[in-house]
Image (tube, rainbow, N blue to C red):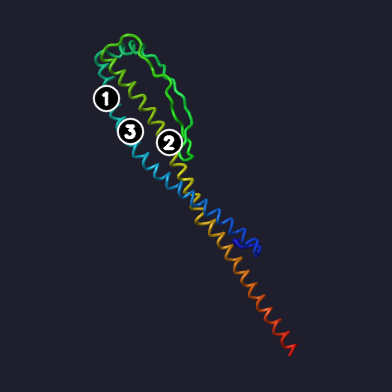
Amino acid sequence: MSATTGIRPTKGFLMEMKRRIGFIEKGTEFLKLKRDHLAKELTSAIDILKGRRSVLLEELQVAYRGVTAAYISLGPTEVRSQASALKSGLEIEVLPRSTMGVRYPFIKVDKDPQITGELDITLSEAAEKVLGVLNDIIQIAEFEARVERIADELGKTNRKVNALENTIIPSYRQIIKFIEDKLDEESLEELVRMKLIGGALARRRG
């Protein structure tokens, strides 16, 4: 079905269509700015995330070597026995945050796990390394969630811009041109009609 089907070619409707397309075009420009900012934010965030992952991988390797050294030095049974001194007291809150209207989770650590009791020096060092990596893992998980939300919003915004630029705005412009052409035709017909009437009246007077 054509975009002009059932359209009323009146001056009032033409003004309304021009008002609407003006509003839509302003909204489209806003969405394009949002899209550009989101794309810039996403690119920057991905670069940061890559760097953080690289650092985390190195920290995990160090922590793993520490744990392996403890197992070799003490044996699995003694490691499990002493590991009971590590109290799993990690407490977190997941809070909402937003950037450019994109909501993502923010992880707040309320309480870190605590080591109570005496540990073998090898196991103590390994435990400290593991606990040190824990906060980095939490931060990267939060950052990954942020990147995913931004990427999702960027995709939605881009689809909206494409729909407006390629479908909706051209449709409105087609309607406006249709009305303008019809109004021009009516004006021309009216002008011809007035000239014919004027000519007829002049002949009668003659």
Image: 124 above or below 160: above
Instruction: Give the residue type at disc 3.
Output: Arg
Q: Residue at x 45, y 47 (%)?
A: 35
Q: Are marks 2 and 1 in contact (CB under 8 Å)?
A: no
Q: Quadrant of the N terminus?
A: bottom right
Q: Position of residue 198 (x, y in %)?
A: 70, 82
In space, the residues marked 3 and 1 are separated at their CA atoms by 14 Å
Asked which secondary structure carries label 3, the reply is: helix
Instruction: Give the residue type at disc 2.
Output: Arg
Q: Quadrant of the C terminus?
A: bottom right
Q: Position of residue 150 (x, y in %)?
A: 44, 40
Q: Which residue is mark 2?
A: 146
Q: Which residue is mark 1?
A: 62
Image: 197 above or below 28: below
Asked which secondary structure carries label 2, the reply is: helix
Q: Residues within 10 Å of mark 3 (few under 14, many from 20)?
A: some
Give residue 56's quadrant in the image: top left
Q: Which circle's residue, 2 or 1, is located before the other in the chain?
A: 1
Q: Residues within 10 Å of mark 2 (few under 14, many from 20)?
A: many
In space, the residues marked 2 and 3 are separated at their CA atoms by 15 Å
Residue, far top: 117
Q: Nearer the viewer, mark 2 or mark 1?
A: 2
Image: 24 above or below 78: below
Image: 24 above or below 91: below
Q: Residues within 10 Å of mark 1 (few under 14, many from 20)?
A: some
Residue in the foreground of this view, choosing between 82 and 95: 95
Image mark for residue 53: 3
Q: Which circle's residue, 2 or 3, is located before the other in the chain?
A: 3
Q: Are marks 2 and 3 in contact (CB under 8 Å)?
A: no
